[in-house]
Image: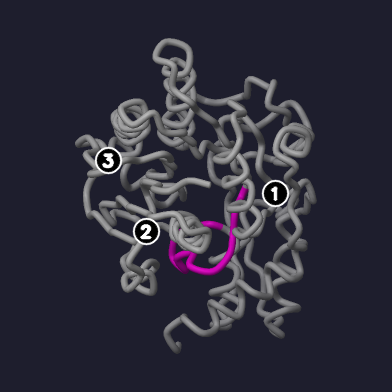
Amino acid sequence: MHSHAVVTGGAGFLGSHLCERLLARGTRVTCVDNLCTGSADNIAHLAGDPGFEFVRADVTGGLEVAGPVDLVMHLASPASPRDYERLPVETLHTGAAGTHAALDLAVAHHARFVLTSTSEVYGDPREHPQRETYWGHVNPVGPRSVYDEAKRYAEALTTAYRGARGANTGIARLFNTYGPRMRADDGRAIPTFIRQALSGEPVTVAGGGTQTRSLCYVDDTVDGLLALADAEFAGPVNLGNPHELQIRQLVEEIQRLAGTAVPVRNVPAPVDDPRRRCPDIAVAQRELGWRPRVGLHDGLRRTLEWFAAHLSPV
């Protein structure tokens, strides 16, 4: 068990859940976030915990944390297309300088370092399902490249620190995590579809809706990240739910849960939008003893209930 964790990007959707779970395990948490895409609201309920500290700072400027640190969880980065298209240079800078700073902190404290990478390193994959040995099919100058290449560089840097500087590192590749605290306007499929279903707007589906995604509920993703933090395994390791479904099936399930039947409006698919996305999780099962446990129906129900309670009335 770790005594003091630094979580970069800890005020984000996923980061806030991770901070919460670390505190529940008895780990002191220093959350570092510049709030460019995260929100103080996500961590407001943690403010009174004596083991929690929030530091508003940009990780690219370096990290100085008082006292011993034995775990660094590096989540800082814009993560939705809408955000990284708005902040392209900042996204690349976070993947580069921000990862350098987080790794330097881990090395200085002899701490375990975990990088949250992404299934986007596989691009529009030609291998299905995607295994960690697959090198990917990525457009280095396309509209998604700032995020894809930032994460690919961060993986390379993490690997270099492990080999050249003896860093104790682990790399997780996350597949489409969803759940409470996602921003309704972040542009990703689930918050967009839920917001539209609850407000009675037409649901906007990119292309024909036949593209697939594999959706992992946030509690399961956090379980996987903590399992990697507790291990010595370097990775990379896929953390995702291998249940694959088409986007139009996702819309139908959300509409059933919301009790609405708003019309579907097709819009053009984004450039370089992956057509299929599904993880092979054999490595996670073997090395971490991890597999997702929350089914799609239950995860969407919890997420929809949270949005229903937090969305402003129309």
Secondary structure found at label 2: loop
Indicate left or right for 60 with 187 as reference: left
**Residue 263 or residue 49, whichever sits in front:** 49
Indicate left or right for 219 with 71 as reference: right
Between marks 3 and 1 in the image, the one whose residue lies nearer the viewer: 3
Q: Is 44 situated above or below 208?
A: below
Span colored in magenta: 176-188
Between marks 3 and 1, how big is the CA–CA gap? 31 Å
Residue at 44%, 42% in the rendered image: 73
Residue identified by numbered label 1:
213
Q: The disc labelled 1 sits on which kind of residue?
A: Arg
Q: The disc labelled 3 sits on which kind of residue?
A: Val
Which quadrant of the structure image shows residue 195? bottom right
Residue at 58%, 53% in the rendered image: 222
Residue identified by numbered label 2:
11
Which of the two discs, 2 and 1, labels the residue nearer the N terminus? 2
Secondary structure found at label 3: helix
Checking the image for residue 198, the label placed there is none
